[in-house]
Image (cartoon, grey):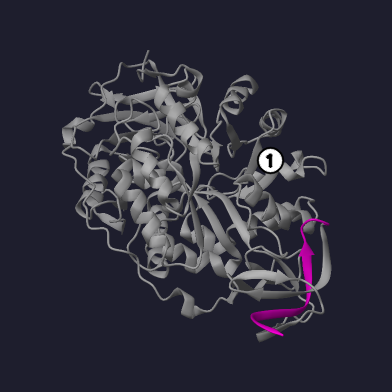
Amino acid sequence: MQTIDLLIKNGQVLNVFTKKFENKNLWINNGKIVSTEKKTDFKAEEIIDAKNEYLVPGFIDSHVHIESSLVTPSELGKVIVPMGVTSVVTDPHEIANVSGIEGIKYMINDAKQSPLDVFVMLPSSVPATSFEHNGATLNADSLHPLYNESSVIGLAEVMDYPAVHNRNQDMMNKINDALNHGYQVDGHGAGLSAKQLGEYKEVGISTDHESTDLNQMYDRLDVGMNIFLREGTVERDLQNTIQAVNKDNINHFSFCTDDKFITTIINEGSINFNIKLAIEYGINPEDAYIMASLNAAKAHKINNLGALSSGYKADIVMVSDPKKVDVKKVIKNGQLMTEDHFKTTPLKFSKNTVHQNIELNDLALPLTSNSECHVIGIQPNHIETDHLKMKSPVKDGCFKADLDNDILKMVDVERHHNLGTFGIGLVHGFNIKHGAVATTVAHDSHNIIAVGTSDESIYKAIQAITKVGGGISVVDDEKVLSTMPLPVAGLMSNKSWQNASHDLNNITEAFKQISEDINFNPFITLSFLTLPVIPTIKLTDQGLYDFNKQAFIDIQN
């Protein structure tokens, strides 16, 4: 009789192939399931009695930027593994846009401390567009050696559609390099038509996570893409898209969080929350769990994850009620997760990445009286924006904040190479009444982005985050109210997840002191107002960019 590591008995095991819960035993050895039979020739060193609880495969986040949690990979693992998330597929293009290959290696190495499987998709678009002023440029040749890393499994979201359309040689090399390794390529089809999505599929891009309504979902299904249903801190898309899922196409769908603050994860969950929402919107629990596991694994060509069957990795989540997704125990690589598996600290990141020299008088915005201005309109809980045209107050030939109509000044300052470039625009929707917010988290180039009611408060907030080597700061007209330092590339805290979430709560409370109530997260919303590959108008360090025109525009014209 062979002695093996673990037996889990008396559980209702989800068979992802029959889509039914079945009374089975799980025999586990060396981190893998070796049998699901009741009677075997095995003897287990350890036995867990599941007592008729429900056993489902570990949850997989199909697409996430760990940096957006504001904590390091090893700290994130401490939070989401107990929630049942045993694997994530991450695109480290946030830190890559700041620190290049060095940043990617930091994420890979810090992740190795955690039992969480962190699969890496190599960033395809660093910078996101050819005109961006970010911290690094990664071409196909520079990415190629990273395929030697065991955690690398493909090429991350291709967001530069013109490069695909024009068959840019470097972009084609990146795509083909991934495909030649047997890996897959993620898409980023925000604002793309069905025809344009077809061009993506033609070159080998097989996934997308940017659907925000049913028509976009159907366009992606029509070309055969695998779709990641997204629910992040502000990217609240699942409720608007889940209705597209049916029994005939469900194998095309899995879940992702994309960008989610650590506080949001703590308060509502990660992929376990996506599963709950899907069930609430009518998806059968069995199907929801399969979307969160097998479908995600298949989309990324990960052959040993996503099922509780012989030969699969023993990543198991135990729940008492499948409809409630009430996680009781998590087994990762055949080991029951306890606090002893998470006694780590973030790796050191010593490089200062904030370099700027903007002066207060640079922030003045000359305007012509009685002329309409192009204004960025916030869409609450979405990363797309409205293109508004509004008249703005002018004093002494320059813009003056319009608090009655909620038109505020926004500034984007280059921070990587001290180029001295900055862009100024107008935004509607923050409801700030006195003060400003500044952050070095500004997708995807991650320059400094600030918004406020006066030049003085904007300048004060920018200086506050520069002083701490990157972060998020909230100021009023008199003083700095709260700052969350993010010394890891200006993107992540070097503290524990508990202390980082405490800092984030503090700046959230500070924001409430300078604003009226809003129904969206102000910090992550602000961070996306600089991403020119998302419709409709955004602000870069070179000025206001119109996605539809694919060109820079003047504030007044």
Amino acid at pointer 1: Asn
Locate residue 222 relative to residue 400 in the image: left or right.
right
Specify whether 58 is left or right of 452: right
Residue 462 seen: yes
* 92 with respect to 28 (left or right): left
Q: Residue furthest front?
A: 1
Image quarter where the C terminus lies is top left
Q: Residue at x 57, y 31 (%)?
A: 204
Across and down, in percent, residue 274 comes to 65, 54
Residue 511 rendering spot, x and y as whole percentages: 39, 53
* Quarter of the N terminus within the rendering: bottom right
Q: Position of residue 190 (x, y in %)?
A: 55, 31
Q: Which residue is mark 1?
A: 240
Give 41 or 12, whichever is nearer the viewer.
41
Residue bounds of the magenta highlight: 1-18
Q: Residue at x 28, y 56 (%)?
A: 487
Is 491 inside the magenta-drawn segment? no
